[in-house]
Amino acid sequence: MDDHNKKNHYENKLIHEKSPYLLQHAHNPVDWYPWGDEAFEKAKNENKPVLVSIGYSTCHWCHVMERESFEDEETAQLLNDRFVSIKVDREERPDIDSIYMKVCQGLTGQGGWPLNVFLTPNQKPFYAGTYFPKEGKYNLPGFKDAIMQLYQQYKENPERITGIGDKITASLQERMNAEGGELKEEAVHQAFQQMQNSFDTIYGGFGQSPKFPSPHMLMFLLRYYRTYENELALTMVTRTLDAMANGGIYDHIGYGFARYAVDQEWLVPHFEKMLYDNAMLVLTYTEAYQVTKNERYKKIACDVLTYVERDMTERKGGFFSAEDADSEGVEGKFYVWSEQEVLAILGDELGSLYNRAFDITSKGNFEGSNIPNLIHTNFTKIKESFDGTEDEFKTKLEEARRKLFAVREERIHPHKDDKILTSWNMLMVAAFAKASKVFDIPSYLTTAQQSYEFIEDHLVVDGRLMARYREGEVKFKAYHDDYAYGLWALNELYEATYDSNFLQKAKNLSNEMHHLFWDETSGGFYLYGHDADELIARPKDVHDGALPSGNSVAALQLLRLSKMTGEMKYDEWANQMFTAFSGDVSSYSSGHAYFLMSKLFTVSSPKEVVIVGEPNDENRVKMERYLQESFLPELTSISTEDPESLKETAPFASAFTKSSQTTFYLCENFTCSLPTTDVEKLIKQL
């Protein structure tokens, strides 16, 4: 029996799932179960411990562990005899992942995927780790040894194992109810200081390696620059964005950013591409363009959106989740080139030009092959030897890119995780909406609206927002992140369209979010709703990971919504969150960069502009354009033809009167100055 047939010879309980990650494991000899009552009942009835193995379909080390251990019959037999094994897709079940990731970090000081946690049948963890090699190596315990020893401990010392599980669970619940207090402005300066201390002055970014884009930190720094006029904050942003755009972390041929770089100078990516990274980076490059008017930032943002529309969009309008690092079982194979290959495709003249510009050599810069990059490219020198104008030079490089892209399209593509996640889709809606208003590109707005409609049409069941759609199946009640990112998307859609329907939807979503997730005792939002299945703890995350936490996003977007609608309750909820999370935020400020953007919002004298006038009036159009293309994070805006139409959505603005000319109202602290019809005067004021 060949390996392929041997692999498909087995079938476990994951075969009926829709998650691409669970389906990848459906033919393992391990007797996998999806998370649910059946697995835990089996563990109780047979008095077996439980292995919960968590990952996602484009995770490189998850694939490695599957090949080494979960596809290995001997290891699978050891596991099947001693444990009940559960596979979890972290992207479908961030609630389970959040709880057990905290356990792993608490026990080992680190986390990551695959995440392997060993539980008692009542879901209490007693041991955890990330990747285990099959046999012990790299100073890591072997998976086979771990299975044998942990099972032995479970059988011989059941009281000890139960005690460990109870202790870990109690500590977990305690940590989730940390004490609050006043969140002072000092935390904002502390975050900036910490970022400055870890900033790489040569290659940009924070820390040494591996290097993550951390877009929410860059967004914080743009606001810090705006509020305190701190030039260093802006330099940290531009140096990082330039370095990433030059590096191999950016796909210079097909566009889009990889998840992180394994080295300090952003050359070698971990080749998987995630929807959320690309959404956050579009938002960041777009804001950086607003601040600097650097055309390159606009181009990068637009090129990433080209990649998303081309490769990551479902025909009805939703966005897919991720693309794998591996193709044909080799990491990065799809993306790399040899010098001779480029010359054969482009010819000697164009090929030599491209190779010089993008660091393609006979020696290679990655395992004997080449990752196109501009890290050490001296364009001035290359242009000197080029016979033609600057525009002709750019045209030639673009011609080369298109030809290489066409050839690359014929290669075997990496696996695409085509499930549609509400939270990540909402982020991409926000990115398309923001880019549409800043760059004045109507087609982006169409894409944003279509995707939002896709979510409304396919991911709402009996009025309840859901978390995941794939192949017609909708599953899992939406988590807090889905709602928080949804509020962000709606706020961006409103400011891109000034259609009050989006404002009303934002209010409805916020009220529903508060009803489902709010902690009535301490404030802040729990990760899963009170209508969902209960786990051993109810996480209430505020710390930013690869993405800003739902609580961070909710705080800022509720403040924006409060200013746009004049409704104080949204402001009050955000302020209660300041109190609830002040301890966490103050103890590690730079790890809460997005949350601190809401503190920056409150200390930067937030203002609202209300525009009343005919839709096509020259002054109304001019003012809207100014507001949409400028970086004014402390400002929210409303624009309407008829103030009376805002009676439900923004009652404070419905009292304004309409005159024969477009009229502008500037409001601060819910008090509005005298109206003006002088658009130039108002722009100067702002």
Image (cartoon, grey):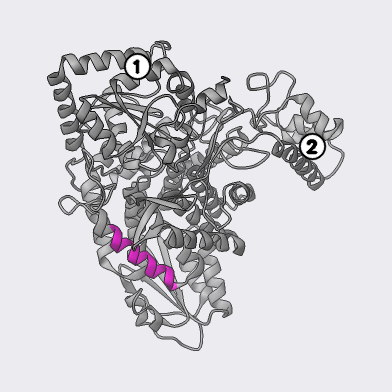
Judging by the rendered image, the residue that carries numbered circle 1 is: 78
Q: Is residue 501 magenta?
A: yes
Q: Quadrant of residue 197?
A: top left
Q: Quadrant of residue 33?
A: top left
Please state which of residues 429 and 6 is positioned toward the viewer in this rendering. 6
Q: Is residue 667 magenta?
A: no
Classify residue 28 as left or right of residue 303: left
CA distance for labels 2 and 1: 63 Å
Judging by the rendered image, the residue that carries numbered circle 2 is: 383
Q: Secondary structure at mark 1?
A: helix
Residue at the (37%, 30%) spot, across then down = 32
What residue type is disc 2 on? Lys
Please state which of residues 91 and 669 is positioned toward the viewer in this rendering. 91
Classify residue 536 as left or right of residue 397: left
Q: In the rendering, at what x and y percent does residue 292 appear? A: 56, 51
Q: Residues within 10 Å of mark 2 (few under 14, many from 20)?
A: some
- Work out whether 399 lies above or below 336: below
Write the start and end of the magenta stretch as one range. Answer: 500-513
Q: Quadrant of the N terminus?
A: top right
- Work out whether 266 lies above or below 497: above
Which one is in front in this view, the residue at disc 2 or the one at disc 1? 1
Q: Tag on residue 280?
A: none
What residue type is disc 1 on? Leu
